[in-house]
Image (tube, helix red, strand yellow):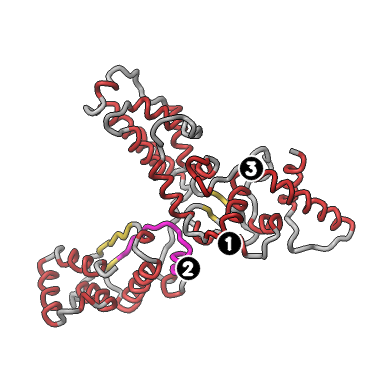
Amino acid sequence: MKYLFPTIAVQIALSAPEKRQKLHRILNSEPYIAERAWGSADLVASLCQDGSHTAPSLFVVVIDGLDECQGHENQCRILTQLSHMVNTHDPPLRFLIASRPESHLCEAFEELALAKITTIVPVYGDIRAHEDVSKYLRNEFSRILDSKRHRNVMQFVRRPWPSNDIIERIMMRSGGHFIYASTVIKFVDEEYFSPVARLGLVLNSTNSSIPGPTPFAELDKLYTQILSSSPTSHLPVLKRILGYIVLTRVGVPRIVHVKTADIEAFLRLPLGQVQLILRGLRSLVSFGGSSDPLVLIHKSFGNFLLDHARAKDYHVDPEEWYYMAFRDAFSIGCSAVRMSVNPGRDPMQPSTEGLYTIRHLITS
C-alpha cells in the first residue's frame, strides 16, 4: 500500500516537465511526505494543482485487483485515502478500480463519502463480456493453430480448429468470465504437449478420473483460496448451502434460484445466518437480502464443487447432500401440513417456491 500514491505521483510527474519540477520542489521542502500514508495522498493532490485558471488535463488512474492487495485493512485504507483526496482536493484524476466484490470492499464503497463520488459498474452477466470471451477464444485458438511451437502437430489438423460448437461450449462454461477462458488457453497452449489432446482433456474435465494433467489447476487454486476465507467451523453448513445452490435446480424446471430465506428454513438456521456464512464468498456467489436468490457467479464453480478430486474438503457429494436434504424436506413438509391445518405464517417456513422444491426432493 505504501507504494501506491508515490507511484501515482511519479507517473504524473513524468507526464510533463512542469509536473516533474513541482514534484522536485515538494520533496525538497518535505522530504518525508511520501512516507506518510495521508501525506502521500496529499502529495498526489498537490502535484495535480497547477494554479492556472484553465481546466487541467484529466488523468485516469487504473488500480487493478484491489482485492489482491495484502490485507483487508490496507484495501479499505486505500479507498479511504482516495475518498479523502477526491472530496477534499477534487484533483483532475479519475480512478478506475477493478476488484472482486468482497464483502469488506462492498461495504467500503457503500460508505456515504465514497458512494457520492463512485459509479459501480458490475461486469457479471454482461452480454458484451460473453462476446469478448468468444472473440478472445477464437483469436487464441487461431494463434495456437498457426504457432511455430505446435506446427509439428497442428499442420495435420483439419481447419477450422476447433469447431464453432466447441468454442461455444467453452464460452458457455466460462459464464462470460476471462478467468475460465484464459485458464483453458494456457493449458491447451503449454509447450511439449499436443493442443488437440489438451483440448480433449478440457472438454472431458468433468470426469476427473481421466489420468493426466489437470486442466484447471490454477482455477481450482483460486476457488480453494476464496473458500478458505470461510471459518472451518462453518464448513459443514457451507457445503449444505452450496448444495442448495448447485443441486436443487436439477430436475426442477420451475425453480430458477433458491432464496436465502428458504435455505435458512430448510436448515433451521437463524435469519441472516446464510449471508453471514457466505460473507467471504461474494466473488463466487451473488446474494442480497433474505428474499433474494443465491446465484453462482462462475458456472465453472459448480463443476468444481461436484468434483471430489478438485474440491477436496469443499466437495459437495450429491448422494450425501440429497439424503440430508430429503430428511430436512420431509420434516418441513410435515410441518407445512400442520400449518395448513392451523394457518398462520411461520417466519421459518419456506416460500411457495421453496415448498415446491421440497415436494420435488420428497418425490424424487
Q: Amino acid at mark 2?
A: Glu
The secondary element bearing badge 1 is classed as helix
Q: Amino acid at mark 1?
A: Gln
Q: Is residue 192 above or below residue 123?
A: above
How many residues crowd mark 2 within 10 Å: few (<14), some (14–19), many (20+)? few
Q: Quadrant of the N terminus?
A: bottom left
Q: Say which residue appears at 81% left-offset and 54% top-offset.
A: 336
| Magenta-colored stretch includes residue 107 | yes
| Magenta-colored stretch includes residue 117 | no
Q: Position of residue 118 (x, y in %)?
A: 41, 66
Q: Which mark is residue 249?
A: 3
Which residue is denoted by mark 1 in the rendering? Answer: 275
Question: Which stretch appears magenta?
Answer: 94-110
Q: Is residue 11 above or below residue 37?
A: above
Q: Say which residue appears at 45% left-offset and 55% top-offset.
A: 226
How many residues crowd mark 1 within 10 Å: few (<14), some (14–19), many (20+)? some
Which residue is denoted by mark 2 in the rendering? Answer: 107
Disc on the earlier residue, 3 or 2: 2
The secondary element bearing badge 2 is classed as helix
2 and 1 marks in contact (CB < 8 Å): no
The residues bearing labels 3 and 2 have C-alpha atoms spaced at a distance of 30 Å
